[in-house]
Amino acid sequence: MRKSLTLLAASMTLATPALAENLAVVGSWSGLPLHKEYEAPFWGETLPAASGGDITVELTTHNQMGLGLGDIYPLLGQGVYDVAMTVADYAVSDAPELEGLDVPLIALSADEARAMVDAARPMVADIFHDRFNSHVLAIAPYPPQVVFCNAEISSLDDLQGLKVRASGRMTAKLLEALGAEGVNVAFSEVPGALQKGVVDCAVTGAGSGYSAGWWEVSTHLMPLPLGGWDPVVTAMNLDKWNGLSSETQDLIQTQVTAEFEAPAWATAQNALVNDIACLTGNGACPAGDARSMVLVEASDADFAKARAILVSEVLPEWAERAGGDWAERWNASVGQVVGVTIE
């Protein structure tokens, strides 16, 4: 009898999944390509399958939950859910030093953006650990944040005096330095704001603007990355992360890096080309019907002017606002990669 009970106990132990975990995951905007093509398949299918079914996921998005954009990471730190991902710029009111992750006009290609993000990752990890009680798993890109206008423009100078919705605080500072008026409008409210004249222009990713129908209420597109790349940070509540076995941590991190983060970056550059084609009709549109926005190519003079203002005014202002040694850390990491030094 004792032998039979021992065998039964052993069989029950073997039947219990060693990595059994259920994760409550909150994704980014449900209607945009990053979530539909990468987040949802990864958390809904890829990771559970890689764990042999030992990891299960309850997936929703912050807009489906009706969360305030500034609340997403603080609620993650409180343990309201286990994993969250959204645009880092949504959290800068709580962590101004985080603005250094997404600097306008620094990266003009996906490879340059990836190098900038990789250089910033140790800083981002510290910020999320200290500010939001969370562990960074991935940093993935939205497409470059370009300019949609419901007004006739032909150069960057034409933004002077216009009301422009910025995609982040540093972008708003840059726009104001260029003579535009930065206006705070939620992404979902932009089409109405453009239609009613609340704003003349708005900054977002080309693909995001296509998916959200911004081409219906704007006429001109300037594909200058005036709003950076709007990196999306995926993080796990630190208490949850620390409570996982090392094997489960390794599995999650390996899968996130290889099956979510890497594919999102690999398609980022082609996505920009395709998105511009979809918005303007200049080329084939793999996403659906091409639209007919006017393509406004920024000149070398436009870029040089904006870059000079960024370096001389916007970055020093950020360094003062962030305080501490963040400017030194940025110079020693991101600054070295992109060839920019904050004085």
Image (cartoon, rainbow, N blue to C red):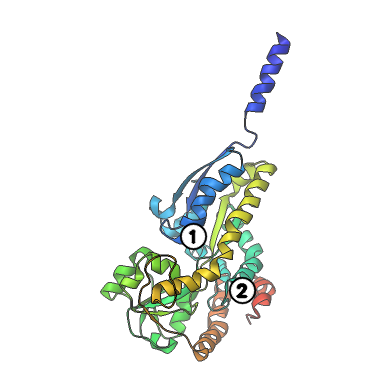
Q: Which residue is label 2 attached to?
A: 112
Residue sitting nearer the eye, 135 or 343:
135
Q: In the figure, 93 relative to 236: above or below?
A: below
Where is residue 221? Give x, y as percent. 40, 79
Q: Is residue 72 visible in this depiction of the protein?
A: yes
* Quarter occupied by residue 325: bottom right
Pick out the residue farthest to the bottom.
301
Which residue corresponds to the image point at 29% horizontal and 68% vertical from the top-left?
192
Where is residue 124? Give x, y as percent. 61, 62
* Numbered circle sitting on residue 34: 1
Q: Which of marks 2 and 1 precedes in the sequence?
A: 1
| Mark 2, secondary structure of its residue | helix
Q: In the picture provided, is 157 more to the left or to the right than 7? A: left
Pick out the residue farthest to the front.
284
Please rate how many residues cluster around mark 1, counting C-alpha atoms within 10 Å: few if below 14, some from 14 to 19, many from 20. Answer: many
| Mark 1, secondary structure of its residue | helix
The quadrant of the image that shows the N terminus is top right
Which residue corresponds to the image point at 51% horizontal and 54% vertical from the top-left?
39
Q: Amino acid at mark 2?
A: Glu
Please rate how many residues cluster around mark 2, counting C-alpha atoms within 10 Å: few if below 14, some from 14 to 19, many from 20. Answer: some
How far separated are the C-alphas under marks 1 and 2? 19 Å
Where is residue 88? Give x, y as percent. 52, 63
For the residues labelled 1 and 2, say whether their Cβ atoms are less than 8 Å apart: no
